[in-house]
Image: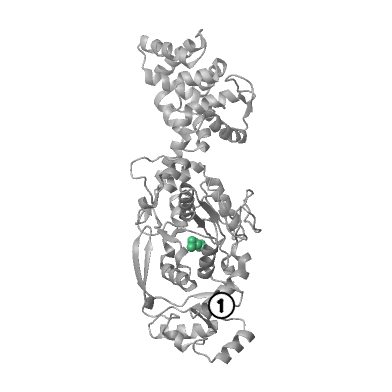
Amino acid sequence: MGRRTRVRFAPSPTGPLHMGGVRTALYNYLYAKQKGGDFIIRIEDTDSHRFVPGAEEYIIEALRWCGIIPDEGVDENGKVVETASARHPHAPYRQSQRRGIYRSYAEQLIANGYAYYAFDSAEELEKVRGEAEAKGETFIYNQTTRKTLRNSLTLPEEETKRLLEETTDWTVRFKMPENLVVKMDDLIRGHIEVNTDTLDDKVLWKRADELPTYHLANIVDDHLMEITEVIRGEEWLPSLPLHYMLYKAFGWEDTMPRFAHLSLLLKPVGNGKLSKRDGDKMGFPVFPLRWTNAEGETSHGYREDGYFPEAFVNLLAMLGWNPGNDQEMFSMEELIKAFSLDHIVKSGAKFNPEKAKWYNKEYLRLKSDEELTDLFIPILKEHGIIVTNGSGARADFKKKEFTYDYVKTIVSLIKVRATFVSEFWDIASYLFVAPSSFEEKDTAKFWKEENYTLAYKVADFISSFDGEFTKENLEGPLEEFIRGNEWPMGKVMNCLRLALVGASSGLGIADIVTLIGKEEFASRMEYIGKTLGK
Ligand code: GLU
């Protein structure tokens, strides 16, 4: 029987999670859920210099907002788990709290000849680096240079012992073998071969802070946490040979995870990686949630910019993966069913901010009128509008009081016109507050005597309409009335729209007047006449 699928998202809390990072987490999640396996979160915080307060909480909140809920590593309250339990057997899931685990693994590698102690101080290394640069070369700590440096391979055993006991700024380095071809397989990129002569002796463990580096902690934890597939960004591909070598050195080849390296998200125009700067320049977010850094600079977030999490998840899923057909709309459930590493594209995926908006518009249309009304009400409140529970679609313009049903009816009419709920107010404010001024261009074009005298006659027709005052009842007779008189439909309607909306835009006249009611209609006709003359 095969092993239970276990994948992990292993962010370093060095800042807000870029949307590319969310995509990596999403693909891991989809992969795990499809296979009925586990999705684990592990915080890789062993590089204390790069630690950013608040970043861990940000990452977890961003994933929760997207509906990417881990099975292990983070509890129901969004806290990284520190104490082991049946549900979270590998706690703690924060590497800085696992520091006791790694040293013995580093020592195991030394004992078996796969690693060595390096005593070179930062200054010494700086010096050799400078000398190499002076000769136009780049220094790397590798199989050649290690022979001339201060480490347990070059120093007498006694001296090594003494330095280990008496000094504290030594490290453990991996002893990269000479001229060996590492043969690797990547689930996305296929077979890869790299000669070890091109690789350096990476630091695995540091005595100074008694902490492992990324490479050691990552391999040890993936092993202990029984990870079956590592799905991560392609920036980690250069580390893959070392990771293969480490699995071999530990004797863990049989349970080594399979690897899949995802291509980068690319900027909308030009070449290169999608960066925060592209977002700032073109006005789209690159982070899931708003983020304020230590200097007080705030970056946009998809959530705060009014994107629905479903839209964000859908667009991320489609950036670098396709279902093999032309379906574009996927719920999380559908993604879980359809996802496959076989349909991941090897080349980078160009991000298109217009497509992101398209997704939001589509999801907005799919939302129920109730859900959108609930999202619109706080915005109405900000504009001094009171929404009451009274039944029926009723409006009191003087008191600025409107029933929930009134708001809902408006939402049902305008939702096809909006990309974001935040646009509702601009689209529909005239249905809550009478216009106090009139668009100049439209006024010049339509508010002419030959038009508005007819408009006032139409207004009389509307005001004296004696059937039930609904759009369905009014619309037909209203049109017949204008046509029957052979009046210019567009001009007359635009005069009315000017009075009702303040511009020649907005919903149909029958919609507007039946919503706001005869009294408000009359008051707006009177106001425009007084203001623009009639
Ligand atoms: N901590 C690494 C990161 O921040 C994880 C890389 C990996 O998944 O192996 O991306």
Reply above or below: 365 against 448: below
Name the residue carrying label 1.
Answer: 107
User: Residue at horizontal 49%, vertical 23%?
Assistant: 499
Q: Residue 294's x, y, as percent?
A: 60, 60
Within-10-Å neighbours for mark 1: few <14, some 14–19, many 20+: some
Q: Residue 459's x, y, as percent?
A: 48, 14
- Residue 63 appears in the figure: yes
Amino acid tagged 1: Glu
Q: Residue 121's x, y, as percent?
A: 55, 83
Report helix, strand or loop for mark 1: helix
Q: Residue furthest front?
A: 1
User: Residue at horizontal 59%, vertical 74%?
Assistant: 103
Indicate if the residue with disc 1 has its beta carbon within 8 Å of ligand 1: no
Picture quadrant where residue 262 is located: bottom left
The colour scheme is one colour
Picture quadrant where residue 197 is located: bottom left
- Residue 303 appears in the figure: no
Nearest to the observer: residue 193 or residue 238: 193
User: Residue at horizontal 39%, vertical 21%?
Assistant: 491
Nearest to the observer: residue 241 or residue 406: 241
Q: Residue furthest right?
A: 83
Reply above or below: 199 against 74: below
Nearest to the observer: residue 348 or residue 149: 149
User: Residue at horizontal 57%, vertical 20%?
Assistant: 393
Q: Residue 480's x, y, as percent?
A: 39, 11
Determine whether, in the image, residue 67 is placed left or right of residue 494: right
Total count of labels: 1
